[in-house]
Amino acid sequence: MSELNKEVVDLVWGRPSNGVSASIFRRWTQGFVFSENERSALEQFEGGPCAVIAPVQAFLLKNILFNRESANWRHISEEEQKAALCSTLSEILESACSSPSTGYCLVSWAKGQSPHPSTHTTPHTPSQTQGTPEPESSQLNRQQQQPTALAAEELGFERFHSVLHKRAIQSVSELREEMLSLYHTWRGCCGVLLFLYSVILTKGIENIRNEIQDTMEPLIDPVHGHGSQSLVNLFVTGHAVSNVWDGDRECSGMKLHGIHKQASVGFLTLMESLHYCKVGAFLKSPKFPIWILGSETHLSVFFAKEMSLVGPESPSEQARRVFQSFDPEDNGFIPESLLEDVMKALDLVSEPDYVSLMKSKLDPESLGVILLGPFLLEFFPDQDSGIPDSFPVYHYNGLKQSNHNEKVEYVEGTALVLGFEDPMVRTDDTPVKRCLQTKWPYIELLWTTDRSPSLN
């Protein structure tokens, strides 16, 4: 293994004492394969590679939903699949590139070294799913061009790293051209890993080490095989920082890196509802209404076509955010003594007599606390957030076993976003809803399926 390959391996897999587990490596050896049942959805065969597949799916949806004229986004052609996937992968690589002058790096198979297709793991081709038989010549050509989506059993960790080829690319136009020429490589055996390595070498190993909080933590957990938050952030924002808050923070004299600008697609996590972390506005309020949802073990995607969901912050939304910044425990209230600070932060009248009057009005029982709900009702009673009362939403989970009838398909639903909790409208209490409540505290979800979609 070359010195450069060894550096990549250490960064991605760490240095486990017994080497990388064969079963974990195998789980990461799939390609980017579209579902037979949902033309724009990528399928994940086993747990682990969602840290790459879910961000790629999120950007893929952004490009299909918002960059295309066609309204028929769920029934794209094979040619449209190819164009959408390759432009999405190019976009993520461009985002990871620290400086255009350094160029890009694509990792693929050395000449003549791609794994042989094996019939038992090759996914159905899109034309097969539509019941249209392929000409024999086309089938033969496809078999020659497209390695299997899961690695051949004999392709082990060491063998994989011995047959890689790195090519340097200088311009964006050349990058996009090369991406298209390697379409069957991305779709075939180890396509996910080949793209991951391309992103890492384009970004630069040293640059990634400088952004990761704990350089001893590998990007892929050697015990469980899931990707780290740094890996997810690298794909979503181009920066491999370990945290999800806005900006940098000082902690015990140490600088902890966060997210520095509004992301194109967002990130929400169940961990926030459990008070393990706090996602900042740059990830919570992205440019497009698409959010990667994190559970304890898996990543899925929630999305809508309603652009007003990511419009500018309304005064009441700003007030909620500022109030909650004084309530780091998310109790839904602040001590009475902080009311003046909140009012000043929101440029409200904050003369001592007026603040005193507001304290007695908002805390009539003299409990010493100010609740968020009454505060918003008092100062922002008729604020319209610009978000419609209800709108269609979709949820994607790439794992077959997590989908109804084991078919990877979007679950459709309707979201109701209420200003305040209304006991008359109460739907489920599922992990998906708890995750979304970290952005919309009073969201309700009505799914068209008998069971709610799964975060895991």
Image (spheres, rainbow, N blue to C red):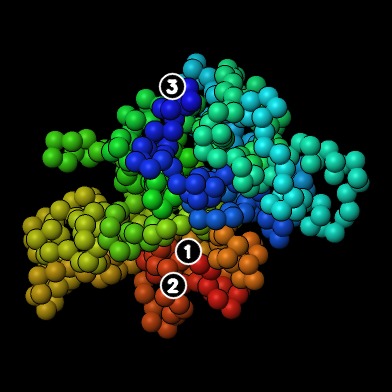
Q: Pointer 3 and pointer 2: residues touching (CB < 8 Å)? A: no
Q: Earlier in the sequence, mark 1 or mark 3?
A: 3
Callout 2, which amino acid? Thr
Work out whether residue 391 or residue 189 is closer to the camera in this orientation and state it. 189
**Vertical order, 139 against 161 (above or below):** below
Comparing labels 1 and 3, the label whose residue is closer to the camera: 3
Query: Quadrant of residue 188 in the image?
Result: top right
Q: Where residue 114 sits in the image (x, y, percent)?
A: 67, 33
Q: Label 3: which residue? A: 3
Mark 1 Cα shell of 10 Å, populated few (<14), some (14-19), many (≥20): many
The x and y percentages for residue 232 are: 44, 44
Horizontal side of 35 relative to 51 (left or right) equals right
Q: Dots 1 and 2: beta carbons under 8 Å?
A: yes
The foreground one among 111 and 357 is: 111
Vertical side of 356 occupied by 124: above or below = above
Of label 3 and label 2, which has the lower sequence position? 3
Point 51% across, 34% down: residue: 158
- Which residue position holds label 1? 455
Label 3 CA crowd tier, 10 Å (few <14, some 14–19, many 20+)? few
